[in-house]
Amino acid sequence: MNKLQPNEKLDYFRFYLEAAQMGMNAKDSLKNIVLNGSKLNAENAELLEMKKTVDNKFDALNKEFAKLPPEQQKDSVIFAQFVAREMNLMDENYSAYLDFAKSHPDSYLSVIGLSFVAGQEKFYTSAKSAFDGLSGRLKESPLGKVIPLQLEAQSKTKVGQQAPDLTLKNPEGKAIRISDFSGKYLLLDFWASWCGPCRAENPNLVKAYQKYHDKGFEILGISWTMRHGKMPGSMP
């Protein structure tokens, strides 16, 4: 794909495929396609409308940060303020997904939305309530079966709790257990080769390991695998 030129914008249209006869019409461009005959895409239009306010806030925040001089963008205090504002917007985003799930208990989009929210501790009660209200077919879907595990994980991974004794295999096929590192300071690093921020952090992990390894510090890297074109739980 060629790099976009100044003032050039992508022309595209996102939609969900489903077992239905769908029609598409556009007078001038992909972005102005009108889609009909799809219940799932009609529901997605509702969800996007519910998220419109917070999405606009995200866009405004990004533009505000981009206008700052480079020295201010690098200022740790200013950067932390923007991160805090972004986290507040994420909460609004999660709330929108919860509202949609409660009003659409038989929409697969509700399962997708709850998969984003289920790992957020402050939304545990609301997410569990919304999941309990879903139809049986959604609860039995592959993604639906993961959500209870996400909710359960919150109680098992709180600060101060003993870490679950995971057992995974290394590249040579040998079983590695968390308990194998008993008595050491262990950092679990969940990463992926396709994750830019993960790869950027690798040099810092190497430095930390070299500095503290003699004092009992170990790092156990757990690499995630991409499935169906995206990570489970990744935002659309």
Image (cartoon, rainbow, N blue to C red):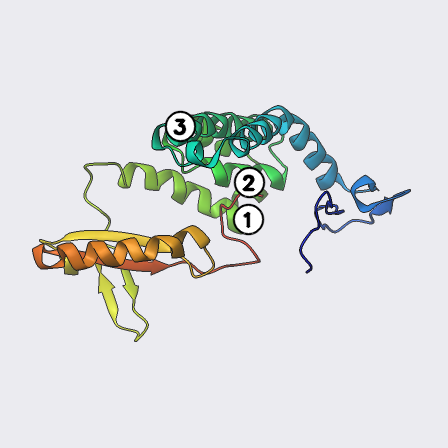
Q: CA distance from mark 2 to mark 1?
A: 9 Å
Amino acid beneath label 2 = Val
Q: Which mark is residue 111?
A: 2
Q: Which mark is residue 78?
A: 3
Q: Secondary structure at mark 3?
A: helix
Residue shown at 50% from the left, 52% from the top:
231
Label 2 environment density (alpha carbons within 10 Å; few <14, some 14–19, many ≥20): many
Q: Where's the N terminus, which quadrant?
A: bottom right
Q: Where's the C terminus, which quadrant?
A: top right
Residue shown at 68% from the left, 28% from the top:
49
Residue 235's x, y, as percent? 54, 42
Nearer the observer, 213 or 125:
213
Nearer the observer, 155 or 7:
7
Amino acid beneath label 1 = Ser
Label 3 environment density (alpha carbons within 10 Å; few <14, some 14–19, many ≥20): few
Comes first in the chain, label 2 or label 3: 3
Residue 188's x, y, as percent? 27, 52
Comes first in the chain, label 3 or label 1: 3
